[in-house]
Amino acid sequence: MSKPSFDRPIILGIVGDSAAGKTTLSRGIAEILGPQRCTLICTDDYHRYDRRERAANGVSALDPAGNYVDILEQHLHLLRQGQPILKPIYNHDQGTLDRPEYIEPKEFVVAEGLLGYATRAMRDCYDVKIYLDPEEELRVRWKVHRDTSKRGYTAEQVLESLKKREYDSPTFIRPQRLFADIVIRFQRPPGANSSAGAPETDHRLDVAHILRPTLPHPNFSRLIEAVGDGSVGFELTRDEGKPVDVLEIRGSISDRRAERVEEYLWEHIPEASHLRDDLGRYDGAAGRAVSHPLALTQLLVAFHMVKAAQGVHAV
Amino acid sequence: MSKPSFDRPIILGIVGDSAAGKTTLSRGIAEILGPQRCTLICTDDYHRYDRRERAANGVSALDPAGNYVDILEQHLHLLRQGQPILKPIYNHDQGTLDRPEYIEPKEFVVAEGLLGYATRAMRDCYDVKIYLDPEEELRVRWKVHRDTSKRGYTAEQVLESLKKREYDSPTFIRPQRLFADIVIRFQRPPGANSSAGAPETDHRLDVAHILRPTLPHPNFSRLIEAVGDGSVGFELTRDEGKPVDVLEIRGSISDRRAERVEEYLWEHIPEASHLRDDLGRYDGAAGRAVSHPLALTQLLVAFHMVKAAQGVHAV
């Protein structure tokens, strides 16, 4: 095996509740960075108990006590050092703990899951930390849609499982929101009536990025001027009592203006132009029903990954 | 979880070919050191392929290429640092790779298996390295006995499997002998005819310890004088072309003289007297058909573990 051409991998965390959109975001970012350069792992594989055992002992899969949190810390730390891991596997279909999987970190590692920021030792491993916090009604709809169409549950079973998590979510998942560099919130446009929000109109959703001053964000004030029509907003406010900027991108943004945002972002990392040619291109303009807010969100996160890589990989 | 009262675990390696006596020695040493203070792991659990896959790809389970050698290195290193591991499991009955097992290192870790000294990174993790090298005829007899009585094979199948390993053993296992601090060789007494060596006479076997000058061995010359009757021998010679001492203990040693050897060893670690009271006692004198060479071998290895612990744990 040849020595990798980078000093250590750049680690992206994507945390959020069930069906918050973690996998969609992970895959989109890997597509931009180049799948051949990305290792995706799921931190939900570190369950201490299989489904049968949980039924017997009553420990929730969302409770850190029901997970090998220390091993997850260790594995994130090893990946950050560029070392391989033998990652456990939780089989979501069968509810069993299966044969572990050998994982070697590539240039970028995307670690998504429910409990990625549960401890300080974990949080210290990431270069970029994202928390997905969609409007709750959307999340419920996404969960019902996914679990009935892909996981073989009935809508009633999904709603029942959400009910069961009414304690776990605010207790174990939600507090991690505080530790993200960027909180990403997909939401329906103001004034949309509550029946709006069927899957076929997801591309119309607005997105808000709550930007904590823990990353070198681009100067969005100038971007707003460049876009000009209010389809991108930028505002200083407080979140959880602390100063943040909020970047808003409307689902109604035009193709042309979305491209202008993309250009603006790349101008901020001219050192990465060689990478850019190589990267999956933002194809917001190409398709019907493409969500500009989603595509630009993916690009913004990828932007921070490339920025982080420049600090580390350009030695 | 309370912080352990020791700085880092002391790691013992026990390597040798199949049925060389690794498990017997590991358990005996754990018994002396106190099972509550010992973590036993088997390095044969790191197979990359299950039995079905090996049948298809032809990679031997004894070939380092068929094992996650880098993960084994990593896990030994983590254990040495006192960190837990999520150890893979190879199910010898089914030939499958199963759900991994959470292991926390106690004060002493005994790692036994076929490939424990395969790489420098592994070898650097041990405080004491043992290689078991019994007389080959004995090992074949032990293997047939174990695999037919405990693993459900016929004698023909066992001999067939030994034949298959005629390449693997000298290629992958045997070269590790060179890296041991102590090579332990059980053998039949000189002049015993070749039909001797049924299981019921194993307690009569002699043992030779080939002592490389890589550990602080006690001064055995004075022990020989103390024992006096030639049932313990000590000789300077060469092994694999390099200087070694060879300690020999005859199967015919008397109970009284065996006890004298035990006393002599403990006199060399007076600092450990508080440990000694706590340790499992050498019960060579108690039973019928007890092997003094085996019991004293266990004690000698335990002696080195306690010595190593004194350097590390007495802070």
Image (spheres, coloured by chain):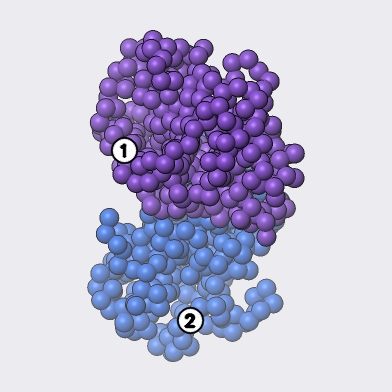
Chain colours: A blue, B purple
Give me the C-alpha separation between circle 1 and circle 2: 52 Å
Q: Chain under label 2?
A: A
Rendering quarter of residue B15: top left
Percent x, y of residue A223: 43, 86
- Residue type for callout 2: Pro
Above-or-below relation of B210 to A65: above
**Which residue is the site of mark 2?**
A216
According to the image, label 1 marks what residue?
B172
Q: Are marks 1 and 2 on the same chain?
A: no
The crowding category of the residue bearing disc 1, from other C-alpha atoms within 10 Å (few below 14, some 14 to 19, many at least 20), is some
**Where residue B98 sits in the image (x, y, percent)?**
47, 34
Q: Nearer the viewer, residue B310 or A75?
A: B310
Q: Nearer the viewer, mark 1 or mark 2?
A: 1
Q: Is residue A183 above or below residue B38?
A: below
- Asked if residue B103 lies left or right of residue B71, the reply is right
Please state the total of marks drawn on the protein image: 2
SS for dot 1: helix
Viewer can see residue A153: no
Q: Which one is nearer the viewer's eye here, B300 or B267?
A: B267
Q: Is residue B144 above or below residue B245?
A: above
| Front-most of residues B50 and B138 | B138
Report which quarter residue A150 is drawn in: top left
Looking at the rendered image, the quarter that the C terminus of chain B falls into is bottom right
Q: Tell whether B84 sits left or right of B164.
A: right
Residue sitting at 34 percent across and 68 percent down?
A: A6
Q: Amino acid at mark 1?
A: Phe
Horizontal and vertical percent position of residue B132: 43, 33
Q: Residue at x 27, y 27 (%)?
A: B166
- For mark 1, name the chain: B
